């Protein structure tokens, strides 16, 4: 066999399995979802059609639109809170922990919870915040409260707290990479020129770490935006997120076309956020050059 | 003169004092955040040994009865076996697909490569729920019954990207001259792969395999839509939480947390090492 033919066969053998898999199990499903989003619902069935009724409903019916807004709001608050907690921690790890071995160990300790059962980490907050939970019993036992309160759980506060808890490590990862890249000499030069630590931080360190800030915030936003487990565990009636509505359309509500349209809207929002972040990051890079 | 000298000293010391105060504040916030990250995990572990039906303070004494309850619970055990089956099979597929995809992206030019790369990276950014629902639609259309096998297909699709990113990053740093040298010295292509290429990506492959195993073991959003009558462990826990909290969940949770902490530490160590190898 000629070498070129053999090369071609070899390349095809490498390319085709993942390409075929991606076509069948990723591309086709998303395409079907997209098609369904234009279908008409005739309970309990749905019929093929091409109309925008499902999309119109999402943006006009407050039942859906309000939840969409609330999801954006919760995802934004979670992203900012996670950033405010993760940044000082990462800064401390990179600039204040001097021994490299200790720094690596602490960094690992921070990101390891990220991969530990998401469900269990969300669930422990239920046992902590509940009216028969750790926090309440502690407050009653220590005499601060005379009887348990139910203000901690099943509201937007418990949602934000739980989701922030879950995504802090996610924020630390890109921040760590970004802060580690900053040459120490630049920071020291600023100090040698008599610039105070705070101004050095705001003029040098923070701008140089922006790629990490943008990447971390974007991912936290997108992951929070699509979450339905936290709402199920600690959310309560006011904590319902868009993903819970989608979930219901494919379950009890049995309205697949509407569920598909909602999924497509979620997908579009997430992709828009990612591409915006990408542009922002590139613009920032040009600024520095 | 003395006053002036003193003022001078003060102006020198003040910024340093302020910096030290800043450092202490930073230390405090960092320690607080670490505590925030580990406190809930600690709560889970402590209450799995606490002799009380509800998770309240003060603690009532040490017990192993929740662990005994896990051992006696056939549903939990079936769920654990199901999860192990799903995670093992899904990991096997992700490793093969992910490694070949990484090689394809690294070495082969083919039409639609950019689109392929974007598509394969989608599941990491998109809500798992959308991936799950999209695949549910496909399976319904194909007339497949939902089962643990459909869950495996879902996990493999959602998690391949983990292997692709790690192995691809490793391949990008790999010096191709080594392969040419091996070929010039008379090695056959499969020998070159086995003795030259593979040892260089091995730790990345193993590390990402471990990572995708733990992620599959814990997966909910995709599993939720693709599972049939059989439950995986997270789905079992999810459904019991509907009925309220039981200390049994704390016990099984503690087992999962301890095991996954070990596996994850190992995989991060391997992935980190693979970055240092060059």
Image (tube, coloured by chain):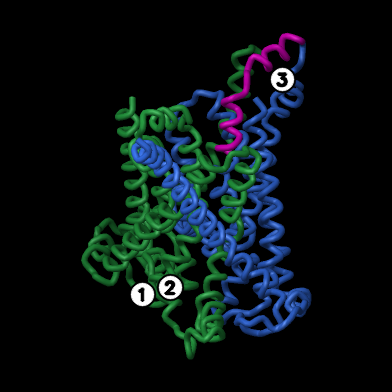
Chain colours: A green, B blue
User: Which quadrant holds residue A5?
Assistant: top right
Residue extending farthest top: B184
Q: Secondary structure at mark 1?
A: helix
Q: Is residue A138 above or below residue A204?
A: below
Q: Secondary structure at mark 2?
A: helix
To the question of a shared chain for discs 3 and 2, the answer is: no
Q: Position of residue A9 (x, y in %)?
A: 61, 23
Quadrant showing the N terminus of chain B: top left
Real-space Cα separation, disc 3 to disc 2, in angstroms? 57 Å
Give the magenta range: B164-185
Label 1–label 2 contact, CB within 8 A: yes
Mark 2 burial class by Cα count in 10 Å: few <14, some 14-19, many 20+: many
Q: Which residue is mark 1?
A: A238
Q: Residue at x 51, y 40 (%)?
A: A95
Quadrant showing the C terminus of chain B: top right
Q: Which residue is mark 3?
A: B189
Q: Indicate which disc residue A235 carries.
A: 2
Mark 1 burial class by Cα count in 10 Å: few <14, some 14-19, many 20+: few
Q: Nearer the viewer, mark 3 or mark 2?
A: 2
Q: Secondary structure at mark 3?
A: helix
To the question of a shared chain for discs 1 and 2, the answer is: yes
> Pointer 1 indicates a residue of which chain?
A
Q: Is residue A257 visible?
A: no
Q: Is residue A279 above or below residue B34?
A: above
């Amino acid at each position: 066999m000629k070498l070129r033919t053999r090369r071609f066969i070899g390349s095809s053998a490498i390319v085709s399995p993942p390409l075929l898999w991606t076509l069948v199990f990723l591309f086709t499903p998303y395409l079907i979802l997209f098609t369904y989003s234009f279908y008409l619902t005739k309970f309990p069935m749905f019929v093929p059609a091409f109309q925008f009724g499902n999309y119109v409903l999402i943006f006009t019916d407050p039942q859906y639109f309000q939840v969409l807004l609330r999801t954006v709001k919760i995802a934004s608050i979670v992203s900012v809170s996670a950033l405010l907690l993760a940044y000082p921690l990462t800064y401390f790890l990179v600039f204040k922990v001097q021994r490299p071995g200790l720094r690596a160990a602490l960094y690992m300790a921070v990101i390891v919870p990220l991969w530990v059962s998401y469900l269990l980490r969300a669930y422990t907050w239920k046992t902590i915040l509940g009216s028969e939970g750790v926090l309440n019993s502690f407050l009653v036992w220590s005499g601060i409260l005379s009887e348990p309160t139910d203000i901690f759980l099943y509201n937007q506060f418990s949602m934000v707290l739980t989701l922030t808890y879950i995504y802090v490590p996610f924020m630390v990862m890109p921040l760590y990479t970004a802060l580690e890249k900053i040459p120490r000499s630049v920071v020291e030069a600023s100090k040698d020129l008599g610039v105070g630590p705070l101004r050095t931080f705001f003029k040098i360190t923070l701008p140089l770490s922006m790629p990490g800030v943008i990447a971390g915030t974007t991912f936290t936003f997108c992951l929070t935006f699509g979450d339905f487990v936290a709402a199920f565990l600690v959310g309560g009636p006011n904590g319902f997120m868009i993903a819970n509505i989608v979930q219901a359309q494919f379950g009890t509500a049995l309205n697949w076309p509407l569920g598909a349209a909602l999924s497509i809207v979620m997908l579009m929002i997430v992709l828009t956020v990612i591409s915006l972040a990408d542009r922002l990051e590139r613009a920032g890079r040009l600024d520095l050059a | 003169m003395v006053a002036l000298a003193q003022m001078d000293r003060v102006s020198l010391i003040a910024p340093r004092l302020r910096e030290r105060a800043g450092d202490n504040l930073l230390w405090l916030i960092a320690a607080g955040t670490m505590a925030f990250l580990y406190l809930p995990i600690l709560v889970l572990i402590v209450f799995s040994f606490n002799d009380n039906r509800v998770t309240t303070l003060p603690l009532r004494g040490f017990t192993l009865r929740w662990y005994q309850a896990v051992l006696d619970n056939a549903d939990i055990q079936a769920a654990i076996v199901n999860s192990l089956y799903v995670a093992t099979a899904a990991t096997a597929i992700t490793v093969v697909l992910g490694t070949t995809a990484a090689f394809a992206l690294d070495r082969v030019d083919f039409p639609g490569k950019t689109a392929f790369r974007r598509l394969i990276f989608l599941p990491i950014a998109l809500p798992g729920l959308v991936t799950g629902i999209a695949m549910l639609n496909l399976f319904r259309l194909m007339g497949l019954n939902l089962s643990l096998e459909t869950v495996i297909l879902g996990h493999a699709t959602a998690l391949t990207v983990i292997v692709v990113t790690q192995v691809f990053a490793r391949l990008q740093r790999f010096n191709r001259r080594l392969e040419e040298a091996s070929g010039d010295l008379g090695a056959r292509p499969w020998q070159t792969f086995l003795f030259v290429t593979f040892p260089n990506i091995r730790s990345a492959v193993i590390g990402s395999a471990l990572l995708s195993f733990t992620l599959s073991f814990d997966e909910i959003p995709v599993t939720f839509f693709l599972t049939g009558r059989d439950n995986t462990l997270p789905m079992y826990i999810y459904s019991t939480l509907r009925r309220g909290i039981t200390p049994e969940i704390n016990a099984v949770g503690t087992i999962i947390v301890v095991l996954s902490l070990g596996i994850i530490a190992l995989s991060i160590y391997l992935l980190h090492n693979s970055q240092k190898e060059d």
